Amino acid sequence: MPSTDIAIEATDLRKTYGSEVALDGVSFSISAGTVYGFLGPNGAGKTTTMRLLTGLSQPTSGAVRVSGTPVDDRRALAAHVGYLPETPPLYDEFSAREQLDYVADLRDIPPNRARERIDDYLDRFDLADDADRRIESYSKGMRQKTAFVQSVLHDPDVLFLDEPTSGLDPRAARRIREFVTEFADTGTTIFLSTHILPVVDAVADEIGVLFEGRLVAEGTPSEVKARAEMDEHSSLEDAFLAVTSEGAGAGDGESEHADDVTAADG
């Protein structure tokens, strides 16, 4: 069960680009050990929010603290946070083992511990036999698994995952879901953004639904379904479509443009 300690706190977050409003006063508080599913249609502001929470972009107004650390303190934040973006940063000329050794060195993980953790993760993600091949030869799924490992190698307090099962076969996708639950059980907070709603329904303790830069629904999966006037046996997909259809129409293009600008920011 989630603890009462606050792992992520966003207060009245607002992000604008000229006249474009990417986020419009978003606030939430997430307890340590919570798996928080962050949902929204394309252009809703999910990428913007993720970048603000990880310190890659600064809000126009509002405040964010992660593990008690203001996100503008990038050096202190890095010790607490792991981040798997939708397009992971990997060096094609490296092998998976070289990539992970490099990340371990950046994270100041002691060599013996780093070697042990790397070998364990390579084995658990079926990458051991290919660990010394160059990443440029990897499939999308293999690249995604390597990127996931590098995001958790330093055992972060808070883990941000943007489409973590993208490109994975069913077995590897299940392994990611199992890791999400395993990490949460040990107190890690997971901020999970994905379009695969059954994954969120299966693993999330709480859900936030973003639409046109505003948080339009938040709570447990059952509470979000109730917000959409559905019972707990209804699908999360139906509830998501219901809460994001309210007031849809005006401003869709503006929100999508704002998120496109954000993706290039930084």
Image (cartoon, grey):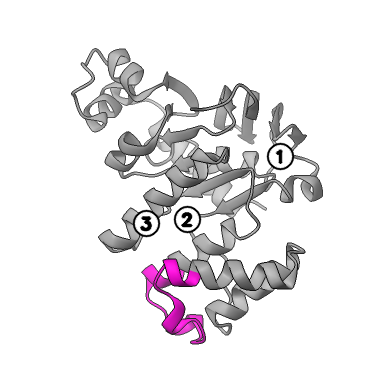
Q: Are marks 1 and 3 in contact (CB under 8 Å)?
A: no
Whole-number angstrom distance, CA of label 3 to CA of label 2: 18 Å
**Residue 58 location, x and y as percent?**
71, 39
Which of pointers 2 and 1 indicates the residue nearer the eye? 2
Specify the amino acid type for callout 2: Glu
Q: Amino acid at mark 3?
A: Arg
Chain-order first, disc 3 or disc 2: 2
Query: Measured from the top left, where is residue 110 in percent x and y?
Result: 75, 67
In this picture, residue 47 sits left or right of residue 200? right
Image-based side of 50 in relation to 249, left or right: right
| Mark 3, other Cα within 10 Å: few <14 / some 14–19 / many ≥20 | some
Which element is circle 3 on?
Answer: helix
- Which residue is the site of mark 1? 58
Tag in front: 1 or 3? 3
**Circle 1 — which element?**
loop
Say if the magenta span includes residue 208. no
Residue that label 3 marks: 175
Numbered range of the magenta stretch:
122-144
Mark nearer the N terminus (1 vs 3)? 1
Amino acid found under the numbered disc labelled 1:
Gln
Q: Is residue 230 left or right of residue 77?
A: left
Q: Give the camera-side residue of 265 and 10.
A: 10
- The residue that mark 2 highlights is 86
> Would residue 131 be counted in the magenta stretch?
yes
Give x and y (percent) for residue 256. Answer: 44, 41
The quarter of the displayed image where residue 240 is located = top left
